[in-house]
Image (cartoon, rainbow, N blue to C red):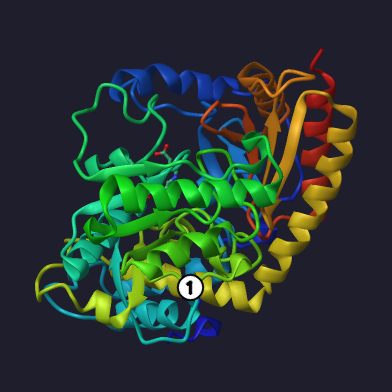
Amino acid sequence: MTDTTTLTPTVGAQTVDQKRLLLTAIPGPESLARQARREAAVPQGVGTVLPVFVDRMSGGIVVDVDGNQLIDLASGIAVTSVGATHPSVVGRVHDQVDRFSHTCFLVTEYDGFIEVADTLNRLTPGTHAKKTMLFSTGAEAVENAVKIARSATKRPAVITFGHAYHGRTLMTMTMTAKNAPYKDGFGPFAPEVYRAPLAYPYRWGTSPERCAQEALADLNDLVLKQIGAHNVAAIVIEPIQGEGGFIVPPPGYLAGVQAIANAHGIVFVADEVQTGIGRTGAMFASEHAGIVPDLVVTAKALGGGLPLSAVTGRAELMDAVHPGGLGGTYSGNPIACAAALGVFEAIEHDHLLERAREIGDLITRRLRAIADECPWIGEVRGIGAMQAVEFIVPGSLEPSPEATAAVAAFCHRSGVLALTCGTYGNVVRMLPPLVITDDLLDDALSVFADACRSLS
Ligand code: PLZ
């Protein structure tokens, strides 16, 4: 391991005043001036939540090219959980890039790759023998989990769930539930992907217990009657559905899904791309549900902003693939591995699991109070620093993407970078970096409260 005390931290959380600051409208003139060039050079197929160009980031603040300071409730979609400039990450990246940027692990080896694999083998749920293969993106890792499961079981079928998001490649787009914008016009899709209804307590219309039981019965029916258990290679599930709306499944549901998988020799895969690496106040969201997945997929926060993903799982499953069957030019790039080691160090050193729980408590307390006064809020939910608000038409269950968009737009023009999500586009999610201060969070939530009050 590199000793970070010998490295010079370049940019730390202290270098930018941790305060929201609006000097211009959002987006400001400098950001606007760049849009025409962006539109000419980049296709319209790439959506941008907030067309603001970033100059610097630090702690819980994003500084744009107009000098505005926005509060970061996005973390680049759950990536910069330790902040975008944590000294542990920055120092290790600088050190690595000075030594070498790339060898390709398929050509020659380096320590960082093994250290990341060892760490994931140790930290993922379960005490069984594990192995890890590194990749670059979340989708690539999910695809490889499917390949490993198929290779190990010699079975074709893959089961995913309603409201699932697994990526944008052919296989993972097929596994993703929502049509627009992810799938529309991109078919035909990959074969042998089946979908079970997800236990979504708020929209199921029964008690959480019944919801879990009925959704498990649906899954059982899919496995046994529609596909045939002996044809199913893998069941892949996000412990909390992310893009689909921050849906926290009812107690017992994930354990029930695992039990069905275990009973039929199906590989149980947890997609922890969005939930993993400390976001929920545990290293993995699987821990909250007491599940021990056969394979755990990680990405996003793992690389602390550099592209890194992993499949970690039972050694015998991981070793089922023939030599040469796993790979990729950039798989486990050394700079990304150095960043990941910095992320692990930061989480431990700064007690960020504890901090994620504190952030969750603070956000939940404030959001519940806001919900009490706002008839447009149907539900507040989440675990740790992964919290969300589902908006509905008052007095109904009807999703309100309009209220959601209005709240998000209010936040954006007030300097709070909040994201939306959900199959129905009616969820505002909060994914602050875990190094954000209480004052910044309080300020962001006051803006959010004003945004909710502005709904008529
Ligand atoms: N699995 C659970 O959340 C990525 C998507 C952003 P990649 N989520 C953000 C967008 O619209 O493209 C995600 C996820 C879960 C897999 C992925 C895919 O990870 O690194 O984007 O490929």
Residue 50: % across, % down: 55, 28
- Left or right: residue 203 versus residue 135 is right
Residue 10 showing in the rendered view = no
Q: Nearer the viewer, residue 202 or 98?
A: 202
Residue 358: % across, % down: 78, 62
- Left or right: residue 378 versus residue 148 is right
Q: Quadrant of residue 251?
A: bottom right
- Left or right: residue 325 versus residue 214 is left
Residue 429: % across, % down: 63, 40
Reply above or below: 445 against 425: below
Q: Quadrant of residue 321?
A: bottom left
Residue displayed at 27% across by 48% down: 227
Q: Residues within 10 Å of mark 1 (few under 14, many from 20)?
A: many
Residue, far front:
225
Badge count: 1
Q: Nearer the viewer, residue 251 or 248?
A: 251
Q: Nearer the viewer, residue 116 or 53?
A: 116
Give the residue type that dot 1 points to: Val
Quarter of the rendering occupied by the C terminus: top right
The residue that mark 1 highlights is 292
Residue displayed at 48% across by 73% down: 292
Reply above or below: 167 against 34: below
Q: Quadrant of residue 367?
A: top right
Residue displayed at 84% across by 42% down: 368
Residue 308: % across, % down: 36, 61
Residue 205 showing in the rendered view = yes
Reply above or below: 47 against 62: above
SS label for mark 1: loop
